[in-house]
Amino acid sequence: MKHTVVYHIDAVQDIKKAKKWYKEQLEGLEKRFALSVKETIYYIIENPLLFEEKYRNTRVAYTKVFPFGVHYHLNTNNQTITILAILHTSISPEKYPK
């Protein structure tokens, strides 16, 4: 069964911020980043239980090319996946979503 995906406002801001940074580094790189995040989210939708819970019922799936993790909650009762944040792997765990 397919899950409904909901994006937390912080996740949307994380993507915008990272895209802006990558665009400043090299024109077009922001598009590759966005595609990598999309592919990771599609993979989460197809395999929501594949990734273990890391903290506070939050699972993390990592993008293949870029050093980012997609942090999400899975609610099996109402079949939703909430994307909480898209964080660089160097971010301290103290800054993870609450």
Image (cartoon, rainbow, N blue to C red):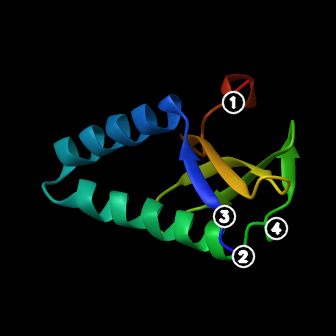
C-alpha distance separating marks 2 and 3:
7 Å
Left or right position of 94 against 45: right
Q: Residues within 10 Å of mark 4 (few under 14, many from 20)?
A: few
Residue labelled with disc 3: 3
Label 3 amino acid?
His
Which of disc 2 and disc 1 is earlier in sequence? 2
C-alpha distance separating marks 2 and 4:
12 Å
Label 2 amino acid?
Met
Residue labelled with disc 2: 1
C-alpha distance separating marks 1 and 4:
20 Å
Residue labelled with disc 1: 96
Where does residue 2 sit, x and y in percent of width and height? 65, 72
Which of disc 4 and disc 2 is earlier in sequence? 2
Residue 54, numbered circle: none
Label 1 amino acid?
Tyr
Q: Secondary structure at mark 1?
A: loop
Residue 95: quarter of image: top right
Which of disc 3 and disc 4 is earlier in sequence? 3
Observer able to see residue 40? yes
Where does residue 89 sit, x and y in percent of width and height? 60, 46
Q: Residue furthest left?
A: 27
Which of disc 4 and disc 1 is earlier in sequence? 4
Residue 49, numbered circle: 4
Quadrant placement of the C terminus: top right
Label 4 amino acid?
Leu
Q: Residues within 10 Å of mark 3 (few under 14, many from 20)?
A: some
The reply to whether callout 1 and callout 3 are in contact (CB within 8 Å) is no
